[in-house]
Image: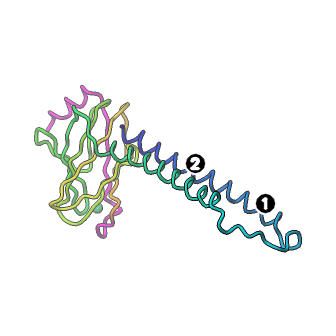
Amino acid sequence: MDPVVGVDRAFWYIFVVSAVLLLAITAVMIYFVIRYRRSRHPVPADIRDNWKLELTWTVIPTLIALSMFVVGWNSYTGLRTVPPGTVQVSVLAQMFSWIFIYDNDKETENLLVVPEHTPIKLNIESLDVIHSFYLPAFRVKVDAIKNYPTYVWFHTREPGEFDILCTEYCGLDHSQMLAQLKVVSRQEYETWLEED
Ligand SMILES: [Cu+2]
């Protein structure tokens, strides 16, 4: 599953379920406060040992939590399952910039250029401390750690420019550790790749 689709679906699912529960519980709470206030209902009912009630409030929340897990799990497997036919770029994080190395050993700093409508795989590692590669437009984020290579993948669409940030405080100039992702047409990409 495309990371953008999976992550957004998980976000909205959990958000809507939480919002509905918040509103419903608040509404019921306000109703009960008024309906069962002391002046109107002085002796509380004893609901102990009501197995039907206990079963209901155990089973329903369990199912809701499990459904969130399933949506989250699908999103996670989408993030980790790389489709075939990717363009691969190596990413090295260092204090305080991003280095991108292409198949033909072309190297850029703080500029990642990739073709449109293509799955892209970034192989990420750090040269020093822990950094975190974050590309919000494509919903991918992963820690960059020395000697512990990892990856992210995403599917580019139309050409455009997007922000890449470091999201792990890595030193004094952490906030300057920004890069740009440029999605360009296939042809532009091929030409760019061969330029020095
Ligand atoms: Cu950093």
State whether residue 49 is above or below residue 163: below
Residue occupied by mark 1: 31
Q: Three-letter amino acid code at disc 1?
A: Tyr
Q: Does the magenta stretch include residue 35?
A: no
Q: Nearer the viewer, residue 73 or 154?
A: 73
Count of marks overlaid on the render: 2
Q: Few, some or many C-alpha atoms within 10 Å of disc 1 (few <14, some 14-19, many ≥20)?
A: few
Horizontal arrangement in the rendering, residue 53 relative to residue 66 (left or right): right
Quarter of the image for residue 162 reads top left
**Furthest residue to the right?**
39
Q: Which of 116 and 17 is in front in this view?
A: 17
Q: Three-letter amino acid code at disc 2?
A: Val
**Furthest residue to the top?**
187
Q: Residue 16 carries which label?
A: 2
Judged by depth in the image, the label closer to the viewer, 2 or 1, is: 1
Quadrant of the displayed image that contains ligand 1: bottom left
State whether residue 188 is above or below residue 143: above
Q: Give the range drawn in magenta.
A: 169-196
The residue lying at 18 percent from left, 47 percent from top is: 90
Horizontal arrangement in the rendering, residue 104 relative to residue 3 (left or right): left
Q: Gap in Å between the C-alphas at discs 2 and 1? A: 22 Å
Horizontal arrangement in the rendering, residue 117 relative to residue 108 (left or right): right
